[in-house]
Amino acid sequence: MPRIAVFGGVYANPYALRALLDDARDRGCDALYCLGDLGGFGAECDAVWPLLLEHDVTTIAGNYDVAIGRGDEDCGCGYADPRDNAFAQLMYDYTRAHTCAPFAAWMAGLPGELRREIGGVDVHMVHGSPLAINDFLWESLPDAALAERVRASGARLLLCTHTGIAWQRELEGTRVVNVGAVGRPANDGRTEVWYAVVDLQGDDVARVDLVALAYDWRAQAASMRAAGLPEPFAETIETGWWTTCLEIVPPRERARGAFHVYREALPEVDAPGAGWADAPVTVDDGRPVVSLFASALFPPRLWVYSNFHCNLACDYCVVASSPRARRRELPAERFFALVDEALREGFGELYITGGEPFVHPQIAAMIEYASERLPTVVLTNAMLFTGRRRAELARLARRPGLTLQSSIDGARPATHDRWRGDGSWRQAIDGLRFAAQLGLPLRVAMTQTPANGGEVEDSGNAVMKNSAKLTLQNQQVQSQAGRDSKPVSSLNSPSKPKYSPKKCPKKHRHSSRCKR
Ligand code: SF4
């Protein structure tokens, strides 16, 4: 049974190529095939040629090799974005200047594709796709687009590279294998690089292994730095994350990486409007690209639904919560694991919501666990601060990492109760007062609608009067009335309520959760 090793995207990485040649021999491969792009990222352009010759590697041309062989002015990689083209041009100019004439001439003589029967199997080897040498065959390509390329080939096994990320799929009787790149990591946070080992038997593909290959990546990074190549290139070798040429990467593949957009493409976000918490400021670390996660567009804030039932059944509730709603309680152990995972993944805040979190029997322990590890905000209607929960709330009081967040719908019970039910305003105000007495940090919001718009200032006063007066004597009240969607008043102590009106975009109904 023939066993072949297939690789591409050598990118002037002789350290990885040597490791591959050893690895393929150890795995018993009978023949070696290279799908092109011999230069284009590393510094030692000429070093890969003797290795290919010495090990009798059957090689086809990549777009890079065609360009170098012809002496083109650019690599023809097919980038659309000017920033990608700037990085590609910088690398191409370096490669051209550091590739000897005989090697370039050898590249000029390489075939653009290879079609042969191996072990009785019709095998088609291309660099990009059967349609074009610089066509990107991503795993996320829609079936129709992949089928077009499969039909253009018609082979049982279609092998390609060019995108730099390995994958395989079976479609319309063709096994499509992108063998990845051996010269650069696959934007997966690993220093290993990828190639394919294929077993062919009878008239079929018996097995395809996509191999993660360990090699001396430190030597490759050091070589690139010594040559004065851009630091983001060397960093990619060391971290496994792509830091340039992101624009051609489709959303699904890009989302798996650590960086998602070019720094200058990240829009400014007005931090005060980004929610209760300030939007993070993106730090300029010198990389051309940034991660969306932990940026102002995607704050590192995890929302967890502790449960979906509630003591109320507000008519505007966007999750249709009520006492009869399915509970769907998150078990405490699962919640603890989520908090641990959030910490590992770099989240900086946790919001607990529901339903009403305080109907969850283990909510106090969950809040304790979370607020010891992350700044934690609990969204509550503040109506259940009674019975056993009083002792639990006392346990939670004065925790520096904890904030309770609630809302009212108006200054008068009739306004609030119209949507939330009789007696709910009084009970909420009593709950807020109790929490304030305990020293629990509170934030209170109001969604401004045509039905309650005249009560904004009175609502603020009602919250202050009922929730703060017993415990916050002589505190200064900062009035900011008249600034829509901003706090109209607040007290400057961590244990007193803050009050914020928000305009309802739907005019007659709240468009967001009552407690946000
Ligand atoms: S809007 Fe809030 S308080 Fe009202 S039913 Fe829904 S979760 Fe409960």
Image (cartoon, grey):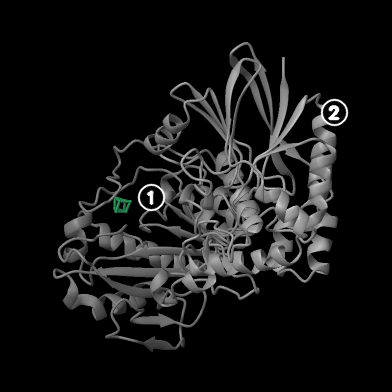
Question: Could you say where residue 9 lies in the image, as x and y percent from the top left?
Answer: 67, 47
The residue sitting at 63% across, 45% down in the picture is: 61
Q: Quadrant of the N terminus?
A: top right
Image quarter of residue 224: bottom right
Name the secondary structure under disc 2.
helix
Residue 12 is at least partly visible in this image: no
Residue 292 is at least partly visible in this image: yes
Q: Quadrant of the C terminus?
A: bottom left
The residue wearing badge 2 is: 26
Image quarter of residue 429: bottom left
Closer to the camera in the image, 443 or 437: 443
* Label 2 – label 1 distance at C-alpha: 61 Å
Q: Is residue 292 left or right of residue 355?
A: right
The residue sitting at 48% across, 83% down in the picture is: 492
The residue wearing badge 1 is: 356
Q: Is residue 156 left or right of residue 516?
A: right
Name the secondary structure under disc 1.
loop
What numbered label is drawn on residue 290?
none
Closer to the camera in the image, 222 or 355: 222
The residue sitting at 65% across, 41% down in the picture is: 60
Question: Could you say where residue 105 lies in the image, as x and y percent from the top left?
Answer: 71, 53
Does ligand 1 reach within 8 Å of label 2's beta carbon?
no
Does ligand 1 reach within 8 Å of label 1's beta carbon?
yes
The residue sitting at 27% across, 45% down in the picture is: 320
Question: Could you say where residue 272 lies in the image, as x and y percent from the top left?
Answer: 42, 77
Question: Which amino acid lies under the numbered mark 1 shown in the image of this protein?
Answer: Glu
